[in-house]
Amino acid sequence: MMLNMELFQPALPYLESYSDALQRGWSPDNMRGHAAAEEELRRIASNPREFVESLTDPDGKGPPIAHPDGSRFPRLPGVAFWMWDGEFCGSIGLRWARGTNELPPYCLGHIGYAVVPWKAHRGYATRALGLVLPMARERGLGYVDITTDPDNVASQRVILANGGIFQRQFRTVETYGGTTKMLFRIQL
């Protein structure tokens, strides 16, 4: 099945559709949910261009990252992409630590993705992850780690469809609420 979904770097021409998804209740942050969506809408209203430019930060020079408990940690280098099928349908991001595959304990994985609920179950996340993996390899990564909730079977299927291998269950650090997650690894 050929999917009519592409990845684009965040850009002003797509921002209205992205904002609409936020206003409809979607959030690119599955840990902070509505609070993260509201924060992004405020940033978009304040300075749309600055917001869009902040989503791609391959040098990790941006402001600290907020965690669900309100703590803040240094930003890692990263790039974001928006899934597009004629309108915004989700986002996927890749982050890394320079010179190593290892991530600091406050970072749950190299790749995070979220599809808007009204576009779910179309294969978009699976395709997006498949498109991002070569980019991770180009940045010198030998593997990527991706985490998911134990009850998020859809996300587990996305990871497995892209060669993910279950590594272990673990408890997150307290800044993430000390919840149980599943760690998968995809060799590049």
Image (tube, grey):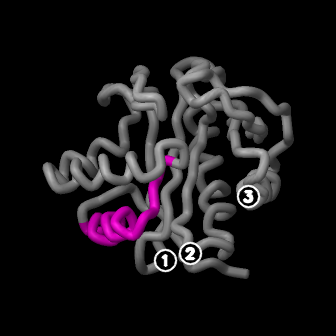
Left or right, 95 with respect to 70, comes to right
Residue 35 colored in magenta in the image: no
Residue 91, position as x, y percentages in the image: 49, 57
**Hey, what amino acid is under mark 1?**
Asp
| Residue drawn at x 40%, y 30% as measured from the top left | 65
Q: Residue furthest left?
A: 46
Q: Residue at x 41, y 21 (%)?
A: 74
Distance from label 3 to label 1 (Cα)? Answer: 18 Å
Q: Secondary structure at mark 1?
A: loop
Residue 85 numbered tag? 1
Question: Does residue 19 show up magenta in the picture?
Answer: yes
The region drawn magenta spans 13-29
Residue 12 vs residue 114, the one in the foreground? 114
Residue 168's image quarter? top right
Mark 1 and mark 2 in contact (Cβ < 8 Å)? yes
Dominant SS in magenta: helix
Residue occupying the point 37% across, 62% down: 22
Label 2, on which residue? 119
Spatial CA span between label 2 and label 3: 15 Å
* Residue 61 vertical placement versus 68 (above, below): above
Q: Amino acid at mark 2?
A: Lys
**Disc 3, SS:** helix
Which mark sits nearer the N-terminus, 2 or 1? 1
For the N terminus, the quadrant is: bottom right
129 relative position to 160: left or right: left
Q: Residues within 10 Å of mark 1 (few under 14, many from 20)?
A: some
Which numbered marker is on residue 158?
Answer: 3
- Cα distance, mark 2 to mark 1? 10 Å
Q: Nearer the viewer, residue 16 or 143?
A: 16
- Counting other residues with Cα less than 10 Å from the Cα at mark 3, is it few (<14), some (14-19), or many (20 or more)? some
